[in-house]
Image (spheres, rainbow, N blue to C red):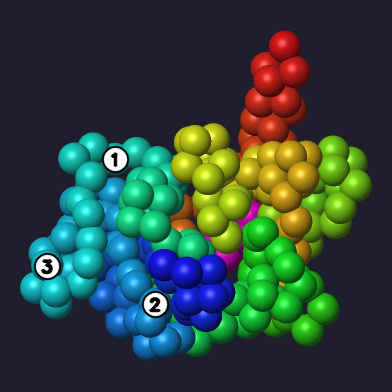
Amino acid sequence: MSATLEIMRAPRILIVIPAYNEEKSVAAVAREALASAPGVEVLVVDDCSTDRTAAILAAEGINHVSLPVNLGIGGAVQTGFLYAWEKGHDIVMQVDGDGQHPPAQIPQLLQAMREEGLDAVIGSRYAAGSQIVSSWARRLGGGLLGALIRLATGQRVTDPTSGFRAYNRHALEYLRRHYPQEYPEPIIAIDLLRNGFRLGEVPILMKEREHGASSITGLDTLLYMIKVIFAIIIVKIRRRR
């Protein structure tokens, strides 16, 4: 392929949707993601669900992989990243399967990546212009995480736990090898920034979960955030050694 044709070629975009027991929402999320932008592809990573998630995806002909064991969010997302790398995608996005990330806002992340020359973009609930739809405990915990990230990198990240993200192939090459298995979103934000990647945020409007319930609520949310902070500190100490 000539250099001219390579420049003119539209980027190949893969939307990775990690899902665990999301039988009531994941198919609709996948369909909306496919309709969000021209030429996008979807891969649902079924993290060994115990409900009908895999059966519904198969019945509707949605591209998916079903993991034989439950790997957690880090392993599920990294599975999608490995797939994207091997298939030669230029951009990979993470969209959660619970329906809280409206796929219609995918173009906003892609536009910011293109116009601002970013390697990674986070869809933020708390950036200017966003609609905040989370508890006080989650906002407080997110603020503590954001302060830690700013201390470690010098850059402000308003929504460090957001699972609505886009990465270019430069970032993907790193993520496929170094994606954390636990608490991946805040840890990878620090890793990318400290390794010279350009990371930005765009305001998004999240939806309330329509089906099921979050496994982390109330004061458990704040406790979870504190665990994440300690995990980040431990990871940094180990890597420094």
**Residue displayed at 49% across by 36% down:** 177
**Residue displayed at 42% across by 62% down:** 89
Density class for disc 2 (Cα within 10 Å; few <14, some 14-19, many ≥20) is: some
| Pointer 2 residue | 40
**Highlighted magenta segment, given as a residue range:** 161-166
- Picture quarter with the N terminus: bottom left
Q: Position of residue 192 (x, y in %)?
A: 69, 45
Q: Secondary structure at mark 1?
A: loop
47 displayed left or right of 141: left
| Pointer 1 residue | 70
Cβ atoms under marks 1 and 2 closer than 8 Å: no
Q: Which amino acid, by three-letter code, is at mark 3?
A: Ala
Between 209 and 55, the one nearer to me in the picture: 55
Q: Which amino acid, by three-letter code, is at mark 1?
A: Asn
Query: Is 25 in the magenta?
Result: no
| Pointer 3 residue | 58
From the viewer's perspective, is residue 209 above or below residue 67? below
Q: Which amino acid, by three-letter code, is at mark 2?
A: Val
Q: State which mark lies toward you, 1 or 2.
A: 2
Q: Tell me how far mark 1 sits from mark 2, CA to CA.
A: 27 Å
From the viewer's perspective, is residue 51 above or below residue 104? above
From the viewer's perspective, is residue 67 above or below residue 17? above
198 displayed left or right of 107: right
Q: Secondary structure at mark 2?
A: loop
Kindly identify which numbered label has been placed on residue 128.
none
